[in-house]
Image: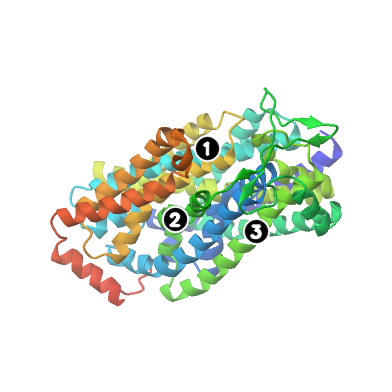
Amino acid sequence: MNGNTVQILIAMVIYMAVVILIGVIYAKKANKNSESYFLGGRSLGPWVTAMSAEASDMSGWLLMGLPGVAYWCGLADATWTAVGLAVGTYINWLIVSKRLRRYSVRANNSITLPEFFSNRFREKNKVIMTLAALFILIFFTVYASSCFVTCGKLFSTLFGMPYVAMMIIGAVFVLLYTFLGGFLAESVSDFMQAIVMIIALGVIVVIGTANAGGLGAVIENAESIPGFFEFFGMATPQLNEAGQQIVVDGVPQFGAAANYSILTVCSALAWGLGYFGMPQVLLRFMAIRKESELKRSRRIATVWVVISLSVAVFIGIVGRALYPVEHLTSPAAENIFITLATNSLPAILAGFVMAGILAATISSSDSYLLIAASAVAKNIFQGVVKKKATDKQVMLVTRITLLVIAIIAVVIALDEKSVIFKVVSFAWAGFGATFGPLMLFSLFWKRINRAGAIAGMVSGAGMVFLWKLVISKLGGVFGIYELLPAFIFSSIVIVVVSLLTKAPSDEIQEDFEAVKAGNVPDAVVE
């Protein structure tokens, strides 16, 4: 390990120590009871709510996955995805946040997403709760694995150590931190990590552009590659039999530009639909201390997302200009942020920028692990299996579940060739189609009933798997992102099944009208 690597390591250790300190500071309050551990006592301020929601949402995908897509095939795919995410973020904060904060209090002060859906329909046998918890467990385990892949790629690239060993070390650190502090510590540290992430992005894009010869040189290089700098075209790297991009006389080879059709644009924009079903974001809406503060949170979150996504995409374009033959496969392209940081900055500063990737990974994986564990412990164990379980028993089951989920996620992440963008896209589609339509109809359609809710969840999740594993293989129009058809299908099923079955009870409709009218106290859990 040379001197530069040691300096990078020192900077990252300092950052990790600060994260652990936050966990220690909030551990006592977080572990007071399960409500504090899972929702932080509905005590988040507007800045922490906004920044922690976006940091936990974006993960290492923002600093590695998105720049990697831009580096590999150009502007179109990365940009339209980013546009969809930015628009989805704003609309979600605009129409869902206030109604969900209010409704979660009315629905028996629900503190988890499965609990909210179950209480919303006044369930007695907890079918919705159980199904929602199981889907969260499935998709968040996949999500957590993408974070562990990020840790493995980061540490193995930086320190030249085996990927698997580095990935496991990263997973252990995340697990220990989540054990310690719970939702409140996670949210406060996510606030700090959101700041680190946006600073890291800004520093790298400015210095990288300067090193590449300025903005004009970066754009000129991008325009020289067929389809690379177009919104309706896409670059196609020419690959050899080993799957690596062909290089001739130091120049990477590209084929003719591929067409990026309107249907493909719609497919990329569909990423924005995922927000309506994303538990780590929706929980922040439920956890803010006052409904009136959500307007400020919306503005903060939207500005952060627009800046971060725009810069992340451009980093990929800058990286292609500076290091055209550094990364010759799609999985390797996701290391372009690391390459730019380590080659452009003094070692100690590079270490802190690398902490940006670690920040993104930790802020997401602790959210995923905690929400998945709460789904099992709070919603299945206490909600179904042992309804009189004590807080102590719930917390014990939570920690056991955390360990099991982490182990499964590590197994999934063992493949070093995993592409973070693809892993995240599948889990994102799963949540968006399973919970997105259900959330919107639950908040805004009085006629939705329990049967429609169950059918919508199952059909949405099932269509994600069916489209991804079977239908998309047909190609052509069927090659669109699975979230879009699954979201539409789930919405249709909810409406049809609800209209064909018995209307919701008077009590459920009274709840809906009270929430719609705003006749719900701004309750805070002490």
| Secondary structure state at the residue bearing disc 2 | helix
Q: Residue drawn at (55%, 65%), measured in percent from left and top?
A: 301
Which quadrant, please, contains the N terminus?
A: top right
What amino acid is at disc 3? Ser
Res 241 → quadrant: top right
Residue at mark 2 to residue at mark 1: CA–CA distance: 22 Å
Residue at mark 3 to residue at mark 2: CA–CA distance: 19 Å
Q: Residue drawn at (24%, 44%), measured in percent from left and top?
A: 384
What label sits on residue 245 in the rendered view? none
| Secondary structure state at the residue bearing disc 3 | helix
Determine which residue is flagged by label 2: 273
Q: Residue drawn at (84%, 51%), measured in percent from left and top?
A: 212
Res 240 → quadrant: top right
Residue at mark 3 to residue at mark 1: CA–CA distance: 26 Å
> Residue 238's x, y, as percent?
69, 33
Between discs 2 and 1, the one toward the N terminus: 1
- Depth check: give the residue in front, 106 or 295: 295
| Secondary structure state at the residue bearing disc 1 | helix
Q: Residues within 10 Å of mark 2 (few under 14, many from 20)?
A: many
Determine which residue is flagged by label 3: 310
- Depth check: give the residue in front, 192 or 409: 409
Q: Residue furthest top?
A: 241
